[in-house]
Amino acid sequence: AQKITQTQPGMFVQEKEAVTLDCTYDTSDPSYGLFWYKQPSSGEMIFLIYQGSYDQQNATEGRYSLNFQKARKSANLVISASQLGDSAMYFCAMRGSGYSTLTFGKGTMLLVSP
Amino acid sequence: SQTIHQWPATLVQPVGSPLSLECTVEGTSNPNLYWYRQAAGRGLQLLFYSVGIGQISSEVPQNLSASRPQDRQFILSSKKLLLSDSGFYLCAWRAGWTGGDEQYFGPGTRLTVT
């Protein structure tokens, strides 16, 4: 069974600073995928970034990058140059085996202050 | 481009009443479809997923059921709602076998059972 752990219930960052949101995972599958989603107050889940377990390079998408450390089983999200609009819940998720079901962590609330 | 719709956006229902939530996807064929529930302040729990018409897999035993009468339509139902069914229900789609692993979510339905 897969497990995702997000140990930070809340994080605060000032605008224009970088922030790292932690995610550790546990799986026995040799092949897996890791995802980050953003959930603003509206409730919609927005896909941010994906990292495959065999990808050699860390994934990047604009201001988002995924710090993938396979040996440590961690997949931290780094947001550079935070913006006020980045205030939201952030969820780490892992693809399971079979039909690509996702297991989600409990989330981290990020608040960006001016 | 692909679009996913959910309705209704909000719903207040008494205990013991039936439920029907609908999800439709546009702009893609043969998607994998998913129903998730999010309790207040919690992560997402996968309820059902479907890889094709009439094919439903249940992840959690409960008084809910799902159906996929058409390729791009996914319905979540209950014959008699419980108080514990309150939550935020999210539908998601993923491209079929030839697509990537990421799931894309609809706007959600906020259900309150009174």
Image: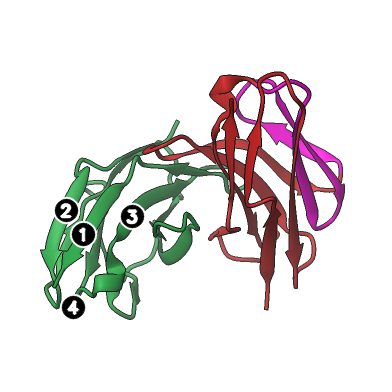
Could you tell me how far apart the alpha carbons at marks 3 and 1 are, in whole angstroms? 11 Å
Is the Cβ of the residue at disc 3 closer than 8 Å to that at disc 1? no
Q: Nearer the viewer, mark 4 or mark 1?
A: 1
Residue B91 lies, in percent from the top left, at 63, 50
Is the Cβ of the residue at disc 2 closer than 8 Å to that at disc 1? yes
Categorize mark 3 by other alpha carbons within 10 Å: few (<14), some (14-19), many (20+): many
Horizontal side of residue A111 vs B88, given as left or right = left
Could you tell me how far apart the alpha carbons at marks 2 and 3 are, in whole angstroms? 10 Å
Residue bearing the label numbered 4 = A81
Residue at image location 63% in from the left, 52% down from the top:
B9
Q: How is the image coloured?
A: by chain
Viewport quadrant of the N terminus of chain B: bottom right
Residue bearing the label numbered 2 = A11
Could you tell me how far apart the alpha carbons at marks 4 and 1 are, in whole angstroms? 13 Å
Categorize mark 2 by other alpha carbons within 10 Å: few (<14), some (14-19), many (20+): some
Viewport quadrant of the C terminus of chain B: top right
Q: Colour of chain B?
A: red
Q: Magenta span covers which residues?
A: B54-81
Residue at image location 22% in from the left, 49% down from the top:
A71
Q: Nearer the viewer, mark 3 or mark 1?
A: 1
Q: Give me the chain letter of mark 1.
A: A
Quadrant of residue A39 in the image? Answer: bottom left
Residue bearing the label numbered 3 = A90
Q: Nearer the viewer, residue B44 or A1?
A: B44
Residue at image location 58% in from the left, 51% down from the top:
B108
